[in-house]
Amino acid sequence: MITDDVRERAVALIEDEGLPAFVYDLRTLRSHAAAIREALSVPGAPELYYAAKANAEAPVLRTLAPYVDGIEVASGGELEHVRRVLPDARLAFGGPGKTDPELASILRLGVDRVHVESPYELARLATLARETGREVDVLLRVNLARRRDGVALAMSGPFGMDPEAIEDCRATLAAAPWVRLKGFHAHLASGLEAPGMLRQSEEIVTWARGRFGLTAPEINLGGGMAVDYADPGRLFDWDAYAKGVAELGLPGETLRIEPGRAVSVYCGWYVTDVLDVKRAHGAWYAILRGGTMHLRTPVTKGHDQPFVVIPQGGPGPATDEPVTLVGQLCTPKDVFARTAPAGRIAVGDVVAFAMAGAYAWNISHHDFLMHPKPGFHYLNG
Ligand SMILES: *Cc1c(COP(=O)(O)O)cnc(C)c1O
């Protein structure tokens, strides 16, 4: 749970009028990444790419670099940023709707693998590569249709190609030998626990193996490893998943995964303080400095963001009842957690929201209502 370092910094920030703030404990990130790496050290386990869109802040990327085999980027902006922060990292570029300037950056900045999303995109990449005299290595992204019950987010819709559309890539590849097909990519769902993820990985490997006559294919199994916002201590079972995937692969095949959330979510905290405590229509509310314009995650995912209260013993209003934690926005949607048991919570107390290290600040609508921006603190770098 919360480390002493995060707790101390959170309290110190009251004095400095530095709340709200994101506080990252890079030691937490380092030891978590090391544990994942250790699980993936069994022979035949997949390579590990980190999906930058979860959290691409420079200290996070630098901390992760020694533990990952590469970084997956999903836009021209992420590509330029990650290249700048980690000039030597192996990169994969995915994502729908790649523009011509993005394809040009891919060729110019040197991306190790391009995950191709459509036959048309492949044709454009082939033309641009010919015009600029570059070679490029690609994985074709497949979207295997199936009901994905129980997942947090099924990647249905315009991601990748139906298996039939993949066939339409053959002619382009045959005519453009400077575009080298290395294998296949799939990212089908997010929020899967290890057993479900393993079944899905097997489905992808079975589909990809032998396809297009590749003898030593690379197969990217995607990300989406589950985290549990209701129980932050319950981690994805990396050991079971790594061992299972290791048994799936055949000699010569390269398997790869690209998780984001399950890697970086635990290291970040959104820390703020209580401005008011009051009762309205029978329910207790604690109104916090800041709001979901800084931490949109609980609104988008419809969950209660886990938190700890750090009491400061102020004389203001307080309650011992279950309390709904809200921010300063003028909308009933600005809720971090509903009717949550918080023990005693009082005006002036510090509240630290856990699991704010992924899809937190970077997915939030920062300018709504023009409140001050949070501070950013990176501990134990
Ligand atoms: C978002 C994304 C990921 C990472 O997903 P997580 O749920 O953060 O693990 C990996 N691959 C692709 C293609 C993605 O779009």
Image (tube, helix red, strand yellow):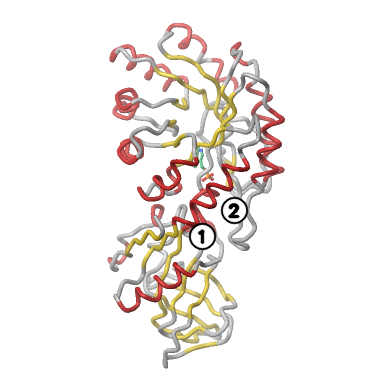
Disc 1: residue Cβ within 8 A of ligand 1's nearest atom: no
- Using the image, determine if residue 131 lies above or below residue 155: above
Disc 2: residue Cβ within 8 A of ligand 1's nearest atom: no
Q: Quadrant of residue 365?
A: bottom left
Q: Quadrant of residue 296?
A: bottom left
Q: Residue 302 location, x and y as percent?
A: 55, 60
**Residue beneath the point at 44% across and 6% down:** 175
Q: Tell me if label 1 and label 2 are in contact, CB under 8 Å.
A: yes
State which tag comes first along the sequence, 1 or 2.
2
Q: Residue 39 or 313: which is nearer the viewer?
A: 39
| Residue under label 1 | 355
Q: Quadrant of residue 214?
A: top right
Q: Residue 363 or 164: which is nearer the viewer?
A: 363
Q: Secondary structure at mark 2?
A: loop
**Residue beneath the point at 41% across and 53% down:** 363
Left or right of residue 216: residue 111? left
Quarter of the figure with the N terminus = bottom right
Residue kind at label 1, given as amino acid type:
Met
- Using the image, determine if residue 44 lies above or below residue 284: above
The Cα atoms of the two marked residues, 1 and 2, are separated by 9 Å
Q: Residue 194 location, x and y as percent?
A: 68, 44
Left or right of residue 214: residue 240? right
User: What residue occupies the far top of the structure in this picture?
Assistant: 175
Mark on residue 227? 2
